């Protein structure tokens, strides 16, 4: 749960609503319901990075276009945005821990936890799990945190027509797709940078930039990929049900 910037110490006093975590359950439930609706659109997303860190990301511009009458229980767009970026973000992250109490103690600032109480946050986490968190999020996050292989970050594609080749010359118009696969090495698989003097050695993690693989594919190649990935997905589903 991120705290307010130091340069805005007086900001909280000007707000007409409580700090995140101290609002009523009715207001919290209204914010959670709104977040659930926005998750179905591009306004809100749950991002998982290559190291297994989960972040709840909100598009402020799209949020500003939502009519104010959509917010219930006296909730305002400003308060909703604040709850999403702090309380809901922390609770979604807590949901990726095997032990819920440990998750809350890790992601919620101790000062707020002491004032609100662990039982209240456990109740709110239960609601977030039911309404907002995908059932497979914890497994996906743990896999990212423990994997030694490369992990997928993003895929994009473009269409084009090949009309000429430097060696073959003019070609019959051939439609094809350019598929860009961005992948990264997880932090668990990164060599440590060692800096040392006599009697002292310090190890620092070295971060690798994401790498990109670009494939030029004919429609037949795409069909083959779809068939292979569909077979892979079906067998993963069978493995999941049988575990």
Image (spheres, rainbow, N blue to C red):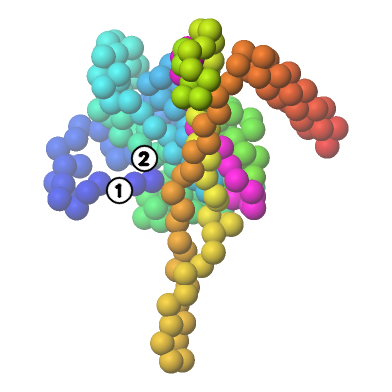
Q: Nearer the viewer, residue 210 or 134?
A: 210
Q: Position of residue 59 (x, y in %)?
A: 33, 25
Mark 1 crowdedness (10 Å alpha carbons): few <14, some 14-19, many ≥20:
few
Looking at the rendered structure, the secondary structure element under dot 2 is: helix
Q: Which residue is mark 1?
A: 3
- Magenta region: which residues? 145-162
Q: Position of residue 33 (x, y in %)?
A: 45, 20
Q: How many marks?
A: 2
- Left or right of residue 40: residue 152: right
**Residue at image point 36% right, 40% down:** 86
Determine the CA span between mark 1 and mark 2: 8 Å
Q: Please, is residue 236 above or below residue 73 in the view?
A: below
Visible residue check, residue 92: no
Q: Quadrant of the C terminus?
A: top right
**Residue at image point 41% right, 19% down:** 42
Q: Magenta segment: does it hold 73?
A: no
Mark 2 crowdedness (10 Å alpha carbons): few <14, some 14-19, many ≥20:
many
Q: Which residue is mark 2?
A: 86
**Residue at image point 39% right, 53% down:** 109
């Amino acid at each position: 749960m991120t705290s307010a910037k130091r340069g805005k110490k007086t900001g909280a006093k000007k707000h007409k609503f409580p700090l995140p975590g101290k609002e009523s359950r009715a207001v919290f439930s209204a914010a959670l319901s709104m977040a659930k609706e926005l998750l179905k659109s591009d306004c809100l997303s749950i991002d998982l990075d290559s190291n297994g860190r989960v972040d709840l990301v909100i598009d402020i511009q799209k949020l500003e276009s939502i009519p104010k009458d959509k917010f219930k229980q006296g909730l305002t767009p400003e308060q909703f945005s604040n709850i999403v970026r702090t309380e809901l973000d922390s609770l979604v992250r807590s949901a990726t821990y095997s032990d819920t109490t440990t998750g809350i103690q890790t992601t919620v600032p101790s000062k707020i936890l002491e004032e609100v109480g662990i039982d209240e946050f456990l109740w709110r986490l239960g609601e977030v799990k039911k309404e907002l968190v995908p059932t497979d999020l914890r497994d996906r996050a743990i896999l990212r945190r423990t994997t030694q292989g490369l992990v997928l970050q993003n895929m994009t594609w473009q269409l084009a027509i090949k009309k000429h080749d430097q060696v073959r010359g003019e070609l019959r118009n051939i439609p094809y797709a350019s598929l860009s696969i961005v992948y990264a090495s997880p932090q668990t698989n990164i060599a440590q940078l060692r800096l040392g003097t006599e009697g002292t050695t310090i190890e620092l993690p070295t971060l690798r930039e994401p790498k990109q693989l670009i494939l030029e594919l004919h429609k037949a190649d795409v069909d083959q990929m779809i068939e292979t990935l569909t077979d892979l997905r079906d067998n993963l589903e069978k493995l999941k049900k049988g575990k």
